[in-house]
Image (cartoon, rainbow, N blue to C red):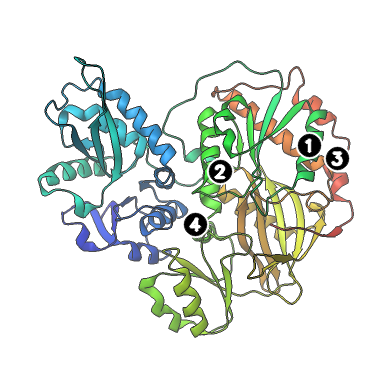
């Protein structure tokens, strides 16, 4: 019986014999059923870029609890030039220790197969490259930097880092690749550096590869950076809510500072980061979250939550694995478009996996419309989602913070529309009504489903969307970066909501200190109990407050 899977785009891509592995295609891996054993995955797809086949193989492996090489964090990191530059700098520092560098050429390449180099003198550098980049097959191109220092050796630099597809491996390197793969198979429990671990609900299971950040002296109070973007058309918190957060922060001796994308290099000067612009794996919000993690400071949303929540394919697999009820869900690719003929019950909802704010979500009334929508979406993503349509007057939104209920609301559908937000062709949009609800008044089965779903994702701040029907409660999505706005999500708790948020940051900071991590942060001489004592209204009292209903800009 195989002890790992080798996943490729086409079986012909893997020309070797691996006695301990089973070679399957990405399409086959996507379709593996619930009963199939979740073996570790060696992802050798041709492309690993955002929303490619290789991207989805690593993403789905993580959602299923399987260990993968490269893991999802490595795939996301490699998509950012800034992170590749960090890796280059780390590797270039090892070049000076290399025992022999080419003297007659101005460029050369090093191939690394599962951490094993094609040139043994670069063993240390190859091992470090594998540790940093966590990718099976890598080519590192070196070139001599221009120098005007006559009589001195010209320094070498890394021109490029490139992940190779298996068919690009020179035949002369076959033995090295097989040796590296065999070594990997011998430790297929994946205890080695850089391999992902099963999801356990913790953001820590996607640790960054650059080691611990340097320590610094503890400050006398908490300085909280809040990342905003003036160009964000539908921000998760508007200026009024951010001002309220700052006001409450002053009561707790917390300085709230708004930062923008241009403030990336200032991040290390803060004690915690709160992201209040729409997140994406492929933009600066992920880089900010990752840098905060590297610096050892608490961050909402953490990189793992951004990866997990911004892709509906991942969430569908994760909910299935965790036994959380969702609408009946199937995946479509270009290879499986024929499955449309099997659809008998309409309407259905078609979703592009990385859509947000009701964008990239369409309803199909019949097979012809389903095919038209799916074909258009498949030009933007390797996989699209088809779900049974569930009609309800509103969606439940349950805010969850650190595994506990944070707020609750009903998001009503727009008038004469099946979604809570309706986009017009000119870019404008209309929204339904938001009705804030005390968490104590939320049906137990709704609250329980929301907490179970959030726990599968992590320990951060989430907005869980659910539909309550006569057939039961179904989780639609788990959102990172949920809306928090004045008179809407905070309508029941008021300032207490912002206090609880700031206290949660304090809890995370204290946990970091107890772990002996990179930062030790405190609120001067003010203890956590002192701060909690300033919260005048108890959670029980707030749970008994009446429901409030408002029109609102909605995420």
Q: Nearer the viewer, residue 270 or 107?
A: 107
SS class, disc 2: helix
Q: Which callout, 1 or 2, points at the residue further toward the start of the chain?
A: 2
Q: Tell me the quarter of the image containing the C terminus.
A: bottom right
Which numbered disc, 1 or 4, marks the residue that appears first in the sequence? Answer: 4
Viewer-nearest residue: 175 or 198: 175
Give the label on residue 538, or none: 3
Say the numbered circle drawn on residue 314: 4
| CA–CA distance in space, label 3 to label 2 | 34 Å
Q: Which one is earlier in the sequence, the residue at label 3 or at label 2?
A: 2
Above/below status of 251 relative to 355: above
The x, y position of residue 212, in whole percent, is 47, 25
- Graded by Cα atoms within 10 Å as few (under 14), some (14 to 19) or many (20 or more), the crowding at tag 4 reads many
Give the side of residue 256 with respect to residue 475, left or right: right
Answer whether labels 1 and 2 touch (C-beta < 8 Å): no
Residue 344 in the image: above or below residue 430? below
Q: Which residue matches tag 1?
A: 499
Q: Nearer the viewer, mark 3 or mark 2?
A: 2
């Amino acid at each position: 019986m195989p002890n790992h899977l080798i996943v490729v785009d086409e079986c012909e891509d893997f020309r070797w014999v691996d006695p301990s592995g089973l070679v399957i295609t990405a399409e086959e891996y996507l379709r593996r059923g619930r009963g199939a054993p979740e073996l570790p995955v060696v992802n050798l797809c041709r492309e690993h870029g955002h929303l490619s086949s290789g991207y989805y193989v690593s993403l789905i492996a993580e959602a299923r609890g399987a260990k993968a090489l490269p893991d999802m964090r490595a795939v996301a990191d490699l998509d950012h030039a800034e992170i590749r530059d960090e890796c280059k700098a780390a590797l270039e520092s090892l070049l000076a220790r290399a025992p022999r560098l080419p003297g007659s050429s101005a460029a050369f390449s090093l191939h690394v197969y599962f951490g094993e180099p094609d040139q043994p003198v670069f063993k240390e550098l190859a091992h470090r490259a594998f540790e940093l980049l966590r990718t099976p097959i890598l080519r590192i191109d070196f070139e001599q930097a221009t120098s005007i220092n006559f009589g001195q050796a010209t320094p070498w630099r890394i021109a490029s880092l490139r992940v190779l597809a298996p068919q690009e491996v020179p035949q002369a390197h076959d033995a090295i690749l097989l040796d590296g793969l065999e070594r990997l198979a011998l430790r297929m429990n994946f205890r080695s550096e850089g391999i992902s671990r099963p999801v356990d609900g913790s953001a820590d299971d996607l640790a960054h590869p650059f080691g611990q950040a340097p320590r610094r002296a503890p400050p006398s109070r908490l300085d909280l950076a809040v990342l905003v973007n003036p160009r964000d058309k539908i921000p998760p918190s508007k200026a009024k809510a951010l001002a309220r957060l700052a006001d409450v922060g002053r009561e707790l001796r917390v300085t709230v500072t708004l930062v923008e994308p241009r403030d990336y290099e200032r991040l290390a000067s803060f004690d915690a980061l709160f992201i209040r612009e729409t997140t994406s794996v492929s933009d600066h919000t992920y880089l900010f979250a990752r840098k905060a993690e590297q610096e050892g400071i608490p961050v909402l949303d953490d990189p793992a939550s951004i990866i997990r929540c911004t892709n509906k394919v991942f969430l569908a697999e994760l909910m299935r694995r965790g036994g959380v009820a969702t609408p009946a869900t199937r995946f479509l690719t270009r290879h499986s478009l024929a499955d449309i003929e099997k659809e008998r019950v309409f309407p259905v909802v078609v979703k592009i996996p990385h859509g947000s704010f009701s964008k990239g979500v369409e309803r199909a009334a019949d097979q012809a419309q389903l095919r038209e929508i799916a074909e258009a979406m498949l030009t933007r993503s390797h996989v699209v989602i088809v779900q049974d349509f569930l009609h309800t007057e509103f969606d439940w939104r349950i805010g969850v913070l650190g595994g506990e209920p944070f707020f609750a609301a009903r998001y009503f559908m727009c008038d004469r529309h099946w979604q809570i937000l309706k986009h017009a062709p000119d870019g404008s949009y209309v929204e339904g009504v938001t009705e804030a609800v005390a968490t104590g008044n939320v049906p137990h089965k709704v609250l329980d489903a929301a907490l179970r779903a959030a726990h599968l994702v992590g320990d951060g701040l989430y907005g869980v969307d659910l539909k309550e029907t006569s057939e039961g409660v179904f989780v639609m999505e788990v959102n990172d970066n949920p809306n928090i706005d004045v008179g809407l999500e905070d309508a029941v708790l008021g300032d207490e909501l912002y206090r609880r948020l700031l206290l949660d940051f304090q809890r995370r900071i204290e946990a970091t200190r107890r772990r002996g991590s990179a930062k030790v942060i405190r609120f001067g001489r003010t203890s956590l109990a002192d701060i909690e004592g300033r919260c005048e209204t108890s959670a029980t009292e707030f749970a008994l407050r009446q429901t409030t209903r408002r029109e609102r800009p909605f995420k």
